[in-house]
Image (spheres, rainbow, N blue to C red):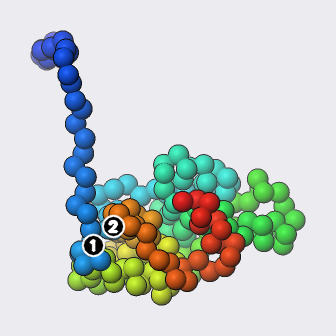
């Protein structure tokens, strides 16, 4: 089977050699289409974790991947909730330790995640007609750093098809956006500063 493939020609390197770099994404403005700052889960694999995984493992996983959000998935691939770096580094774990009298290492993702019934999502249809500024206004109003996008027009059940992230939007704008009241408490503000 293998002998029908001939080996590829090689060349020796010399002189000055550059390496390719991906094109930097177009800089966005508040007026750019909202889809330009959406992490599209139809083309990019979502970062997911199970509810019964220790919180510290979730935190390590986020740090290794350089992300601040994980979708929490049940075994049957349905959404259980969402966990963010702010959840892990904020006051939620401390509160949980005090309430339950357990060790930090015993806290599970499901103990501090935002459960499905507390999550809001923006419909993809709405996003398709929106600008980056609309997304920022929505995040500001909800007091959150992330928003999910749901596609209600899929065959079968609705699906989460995208995520907006405050830090991702800032990165693409190339500027910090004044947060107003995005962080809910001083401890969360503090953890936001530490994490960024």
Q: Image point 21% across, 24% down: which residue?
A: 17
3D distance between C-alphas at marks 1 and 2 = 6 Å
Q: Quadrant of the C terminus?
A: bottom right
Q: Image point 33% across, 81% down: which residue?
A: 133
Residue farthest along the right direction in this orientation: 101
Foreground residue among 40 and 185: 185
The answer, for residue 192, to whether it is visible in the render is yes
The answer, for residue 73, to whether it is visible in the render is no
Q: Which mark is residue 173?
A: 2
- Side of 29 where 139 appears, left or right: right
Foreground residue among 153 and 47: 47
Q: Earlier in the sequence, mark 1 or mark 2?
A: 1
Q: Is residue 50 above or below residue 179?
A: above
Query: What residue is disc 1 on?
Result: 29
Q: Image point 76% across, 53% down: which residue?
A: 105
What secondary structure is marked by label 1? loop
- Side of 38 where 87 appears, left or right: right
């Amino acid at each position: 089977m293998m002998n029908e493939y001939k080996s590829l020609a090689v060349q020796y390197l010399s002189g000055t050699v550059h390496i390719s770099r991906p094109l930097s994404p177009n800089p966005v403005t508040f007026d750019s289409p909202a889809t330009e700052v959406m992490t599209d889960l139809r083309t990019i694999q979502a970062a997911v974790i199970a509810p019964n995984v220790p919180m510290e493992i979730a935190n390590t996983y986020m740090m290794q991947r350089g992300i601040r959000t994980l979708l929490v998935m049940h075994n049957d691939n349905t959404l259980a909730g969402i966990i963010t770096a702010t959840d892990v580094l904020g006051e939620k774990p401390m509160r949980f330790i005090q309430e339950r009298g357990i060790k930090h290492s015993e806290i599970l993702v499901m103990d501090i995640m935002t459960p499905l019934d507390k999550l809001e999502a923006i419909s993809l249809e709405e996003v398709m007609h929106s600008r980056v500024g609309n997304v920022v206004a929505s995040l500001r109003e909800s007091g959150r750093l992330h928003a999910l996008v749901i596609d209600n027009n899929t065959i079968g059940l609705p699906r989460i098809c995208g995520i907006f992230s405050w830090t991702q939007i800032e990165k693409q704008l190339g500027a910090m956006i004044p947060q107003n009241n995005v962080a809910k408490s001083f401890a969360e503000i503090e953890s936001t500063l530490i994490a960024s």
